[in-house]
Image (cartoon, grey):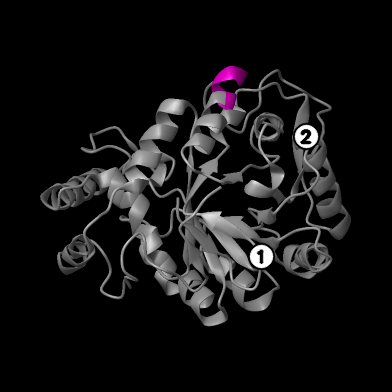
Amino acid sequence: MRRRKIPHTAVELTELGFGASVIGNLYRTTSAEEAAAAVHTAWDAGIRYYDTAPHYGLGLSEHRLGAALRDHPRDQYVISSKAGRLLVPNEHPQGVDTEGFVVRDDLRRQWDFSRDGILRSIDGTLTRTGLDRLDIVYLHDPDDHWRQASDEAMPALASLRDQGVIGAIGAGMNQSAMLARFLRETAADMVMLAGRYTLLDQSALDDVLPAAQEHGKSVVAVGVFNSGLLSHDRPVDGMKYDYRAAPPEFVDRARAIADVCEAHGTTLPAAAIAFPLTHPSVVNVTLGMRDPVQVRRNARLHQEDLPQDLWHDLRSRGFLRPDTPFAGGSGASTQGERSDGCP
């Protein structure tokens, strides 16, 4: 599987990444055996980038991902986690977590972007994963905490990076405007952008993607299916768009894009995975994968060789913005070095 390098760092990511939120029991229970099988299947498919966070299942995702990766050579994969939400004892548990994960709520999340909070968060992640280091650390959803995140948290991460403790640092959010500020105004090497550079939403062209190009920094694209609407060959009524029921006009637009994809010999989900990687600053697309079936499907879709004419056709029909750049398709080189081998 092709790799792309994060400029100014030693970190390389496979173009496809394994998102571990779902193995933290997002929305429904996933067994420990199924979660481990998903990670091992991803490895067999050539995926070498794995992303998790304390938020995901109140630490369950980190536990499961760390346990599964312990079977593999540490120098052959990249793992990222996030900081900004400490896990602390829950003084008033109700039995089940209230933030979308089917887990007991013996712990609760506590916002903390102070230097001490970031260090405590990383220590907690290392304990839960059982790993000796993290390759990437993102500040997690600092929407309401810009000042502390930029003045305290990011310098703390930069210090760890400069000491060689962490390979790269950044922030991850569902919005793009503040991510652009992180790229322009802080020591961030990269950002994780959720849902804002997809076949249905190219709003990141207004801010974070120009910032990445201007400063030679990188973007990891997540949420590329926009909560599911782009995940099926033929979208149907009742599907989700950005965590809510998809408006009829978005369903119609997704169906029309699917028609164009079919005319070019491919499918809507394959195009949804490939599209962000056509931008020169995007180094990776990470997808949530719950079980081996999902892993194998996503890996197969990623490996499809999509025609360059597809993007130009979508743009000419108004489905992509007129200023959408193409760097040569999903296998294009980026601002960082690209390699085609994977241990």
> From the viewer's perspective, is 321 left or right of 204?
left
Q: Residue furthest right?
A: 116
**Going 66% across and 65% down the picture, which residue do you hit?**
10
Q: CA distance from mark 1 to mark 2?
A: 25 Å
Q: Can residue 65 be found in the magenta stretch?
A: no
| 83 to 104, vertically: above or below | below
Residue linked to disc 1: 10
Q: Amino acid at mark 2?
A: Arg
Residue occupying the point 63% across, 29% down? 98
Q: Residue at 16% across / 69% down in the picture? A: 316
| Circle 1: element type | loop
Instruction: Give the dominant element type of the magenta stretch: helix, strand or loop.
Output: helix
N-term-proximal mark, 1 vs 2: 1
Q: Residue beneath label 2, please?
A: 128
Question: Can you tell which of label 1 and label 2 is closer to the viewer?
Answer: 1
Q: Alpha-carbon neighbours of circle 1 within 10 Å: few (<14), some, or many (≥20)?
A: few
Residue 120 position (above or below residue 320): above
State the image quarter where residue 278 is shown: bottom left
Residue furthest left as drawn:
263
Magenta region: which residues?
32-36
| 35, 230: nearer the viewer | 35
Q: Badge 2 local density, few (<14 within 10 Å), some, or many (20+)?
A: some
Residue 323 horizontal/vertical position (percent): 30, 75
Asked if one can make out residue 165 in the rendered structure from this viewpoint, the answer is: yes
Point out residue 279 in the picture as x, y percentages from the top left corner. 39, 67
Q: Secondary structure at mark 2?
A: helix
Residue 288 is left or right of residue 135, and the answer is left
